[in-house]
Amino acid sequence: MKLSTTLYIIAAVYMLLINLTGFTLMGIDKHRARNMAWRIPEADLFAAAILGGSVGSLIGMFFFHHKTKHLSFLIGMPLILLIQIGILLWFMFRSPFTLSII
């Protein structure tokens, strides 16, 4: 197996896991909010999104109807996703480290 193929597999697994984490954190925090239990800090919810889990976090927000009335989340989560898409596109088309698609 080529090194580039291995790196793509590692990246895909990472993206799957971090997005599942973002989704799960939203669900856990919603459950804890309903039960008046210790909450997950908002900074941790944003950290999961910033680390690559923005899609999972956004899906979790709307699936669990959690943080959907918070302007910081309604603007922040899509903004994080757009920035990540921009960075990916920059690496694909403008960077000297241009990604080659498998």
Image (spheres, rainbow, N blue to C red):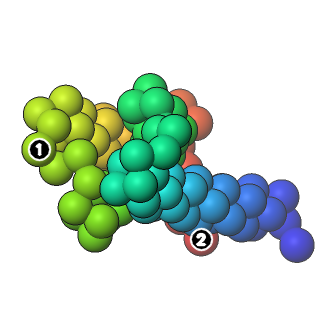
Horizontal arrangement in the rendering, residue 53 relative to residue 5 (left or right): left
Name the residue nearer the viewer: 44 or 36: 36
Residue at the outermost top position:
43
- 66 vs 14, left or right, is left
User: In the figure, 92 relative to 56: above or below?
Assistant: above
Which of discs 1 and 2 lies nearer the camera? The answer is: 1
Apparent side of residue 88 relative to residue 24 in the rendered image (left or right): left
Can residue 39 be seen?
yes
Which residue is found at the position 35% from the left and 62% from the top?
60
The residue closer to the viewer here, 52 or 95, is 52
The image quarter in which residue 90 lies: top left
Q: How many marks?
A: 2
Q: Quadrant of the N terminus?
A: bottom right
Within 10 Å of disc 1 (Cα), the crowding (few <14, some 14-19, many 20+) is few
Mark 2 = which residue?
Answer: 102
Q: Earlier in the sequence, mark 1 or mark 2?
A: 1
- Residue ID at (34%, 56%): 34
Tell me the residue that label 1 is attached to: 69
> In the image as oriented, which residue stretches furthest toward the front?
36
Name the residue located 16 percent from the left edge and 50 percent from the top edge.
68
Residue 63, quarter of the rendered image: bottom left
Percent coordinates x, y for residue 42 in the rendering: 40, 31
The label shown at residue 98 is: none
Say which element carries label 1.
loop
Q: In the figure, is residue 97 to the left or right of 47? A: right
Can you say whether 64 is above or below 37 in the image? below
Residue 32's spot in the image, x, y percent? 45, 52
Whole-percent x and y of residue 58? 30, 55
Question: Residue at point 22% right, 38% down?
Answer: 73
Q: Is residue 92 visible?
A: no
Amino acid of disc 2: Ile
Q: Nearer the viewer, residue 1 or 26?
A: 26
